[in-house]
Structure formats: C-alpha cells, structure tokens
Amino acid sequence: MNPTDMQKDSRKFVASLQTYMRKNALDAFFVAELPNVRYLTTFTGTSGYCLVFRDSAYFLTDFRYKTQASRQVASCETVVYSGNLFEFIRKKFFKGSKEASIGFEDTLTVGMFSEAQERVSGCKFVKTSQVLEKLAAVKTKGEVERIRQACAISSTALDVLVQEEWRGKTESELAAMLEFNQKIIGASGTSFETIVASGARGAMPHGVASGKEVTRNEFVTIDFGCFYDGYASDITRTFQTGSKVKPELTTIYKVVHDAQLKAIATARAGAKASRVDEAARDHIEKKGYGKFFGHGTGHGVGLRIHELPRVSRISEDVLEEGNVITIEPGIYIPRLGGVRIEDDFLVTKDGVEQLSHFSKDAEYYISAYGRH
Ligand SMILES: [Mn+2]
C-alpha cells in the first residue's frame, strides 16, 4: 500500500519517540492514551496500544480491529492479542529478557499500572509526563491542513446558522443546528460539547447550551468546533440579537476584541506563551475588567481540543514554529453576561497565520436574530 501523508508522519513520530527513549535510557515505551496511539499509528479505533522499542514498534489490538489496523497502521507492526494484555506482552516481548526499563504515560490508569507491574514483573516501570504531547505540540504540514479544514467547516457551519431563523429557538436548538451543519459539511463530529450561552448565562465561560430561549437584545456566546480527519477546530463568537443591548456589553465587546488583537500581535515563534496571555490580560486590566477574565488566553489544538502549548499567565512554554494555538480572551460579568472571541492560529517564524475565519464585526451580528 502507498502510505498516506499521515502514515508517513506517524513513522516520523515513532522515530522521534525512539530518539527520546535513547536519550532517556528507556528500552521500551508503553502507550495507552488513545490520542497518543492515534498520533503514533493513525489508528482511529477505540482499542489499541503501542509498545515501542528502540529499534522496533508494535501496535497491539484485538481481533475486532484486525482489518482496520492492517489498512491504517504503517508505522508499527500490528499484533493481534487475546486474553490478558500484559500477560501477552510479557510472553511475547519480555520472556527471559534481562530487566528492561519501560516508560509509561502518567495518565495510565492505576488499574492498568498495577496490572502491568504484576504481570510484567522484573521490569522497571518509569513514569513519564507529556512526552508525546510535547512532540505533538509541533504540527506537520498535514496536521495543519486538517486543522485548517476543520476550521473552514466550523466557519461555514456558523455562517449557515447566522442565516437561519433564531427567533423562538432555545440555546440547545441553536447548538443542535450548528452541530448538524458541521456534520453535513464534512465534520466527523463535534470536538467538544457546544457552548451556547445567552443573556446572563453568557457570564458562565463554559455554559453549555440550555433550554433557555434566545431572545432579542442580548449577547449570545457560541463556542464550538469539530473534528476533521482526527483534528479539531475551536472557535468562539459572541453575537448580538438586536441593537438595544445594555451599553456595557458593547463596551466589553470592544475590550475583548482589542485584547485579542493585542495578543495576536505578540504571538510568534520564540515568544513566551505567557507574554501572549499578558498582552490580552494587560489590556483587559487597563480597561478595568481584569477580575472578570479568569481563564487563560489560549491553548494548543490538534488531535485533542486542549493540547500544548498552554497560553496562560503561568505557562513556561515558549512558542515554536508549527504550534497551533487558540487566542480567546473573554470578560464575564455576573448577572450581565459575557463576551469571548476565539480563533485558531498557526505559529510562524515572524507571527501567526490565522486558520479560522469569521467576521468579528459586532454590528454584523445584529442581523443574526429576527432578520425576517
Ligand atoms: Mn478554546
């Protein structure tokens, strides 16, 4: 079979893990976290593990995924196991071998960890932290193209939603319409539970869509995204359902919008991620809304909706060429409502390239409600 671009990438990812293993004196590395398994293999099923050695790599799955694995996995040798996974691993890979150092993810469940220690006795298990997550923070061309496509699907879906009738609809109905649009356009699913927070509910940064009806003259924050070929988009816009909103909402819209622009201007390879956060936060603080901006400015996006690097005040990450990050400042005022604006960006040598595109013009959104 001719390997796809992602299969070629997955071979590079396995090689990068092997380089890490050599540097850190690990003989093997056991991977259970599904997004990490997918990263190393392109396998999209729900049951599979990687066991990587310095000069070889195995993908372990059960008989249900034999055919799928033979089509998808090009970076590892597929091994179909039955019975107890660790018993199988011990017999096949560690029988009679001298003590091996096996790295494992710190997200491994306690159950699996104790099972591994018990069954594969005589080996040394070494806890690691975010080894694959750090590798995955720098995206390949193919990964960026998939995120770009996910963003395009989300933007188009939102564009369709804005032209639909909002009157009489609840937040949940608008969320369902948006999710439907994304899937019809080509998404495999949503990348997280769609947030539609209208009126005073907008003060909840993660107010998932409720049964509240969206009414005239309020702000509606919609935070949503989709998966396209495994990769996520993450976009937020705050809409205005009429011209007669409370003046303070219009004020905070401009503050958040400007804060996002300031953060965008700061982001580039070599910049501290905390500096990007600071640019947004300083502006919001200067305008007197500091205490209403309680979350970080952004995060990496990829196979997961939240990845490295972290874009927050306490982040020690330095932005690298190939990172894909969100920039999403917000202001949330109890009983009044909230505003958040979020886009996805590819970090480049001298700045960022915006991957998500949708109008941020506050006036534009007035037409989103009751346009008929
Ligand atoms: Mn986000």
Image (cartoon, rainbow, N blue to C red):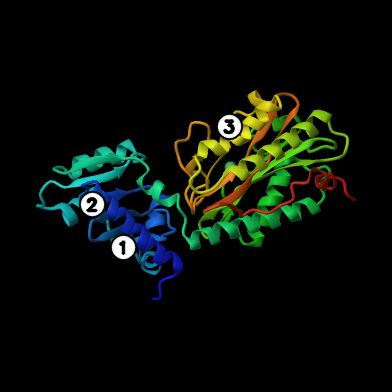
Please state which of the two labelled residues, at mark 3 or mark 1, is closer to the viewer.
Answer: 3
Task: Give the amino acid at mark 1.
Answer: Cys
Q: Disc 3 and disc 1: Cα gap in Å?
A: 39 Å
Q: Disc 2 and disc 3: Cα gap in Å?
A: 38 Å
| Classed neighbour count for the residue bearing mark 2: other residues with Cα under 10 Å, few (<14), some (14–19), many (≥20) | few
Within 8 Å: ligand 1 and the Cβ of disc 1?
no
Question: Residue at coordinates 44% horizontally, 70% vertically from top-left?
Answer: 4
Residue where numbered disc 2 is placed: 22
Which labelled disc corresponds to residue 76? 1
Task: Give the amino acid at mark 3.
Answer: His
Please state which of the two labelled residues, at mark 2 or mark 1, is closer to the viewer.
Answer: 2
| Classed neighbour count for the residue bearing mark 3: other residues with Cα under 10 Å, few (<14), some (14–19), many (≥20) | some
Classify the position of the N terminus by image quarter: bottom left
Which labelled disc corresponds to residue 295? 3
Q: Nearer the viewer, residue 114 or 273?
A: 273
Q: Earlier in the sequence, mark 2 or mark 3?
A: 2
> Residue 310, can we see it?
yes
Instruction: Point out the quarter of the image occupied by ligand 1.
Output: top right
Q: Disc 2 and disc 1: Cα gap in Å?
A: 18 Å
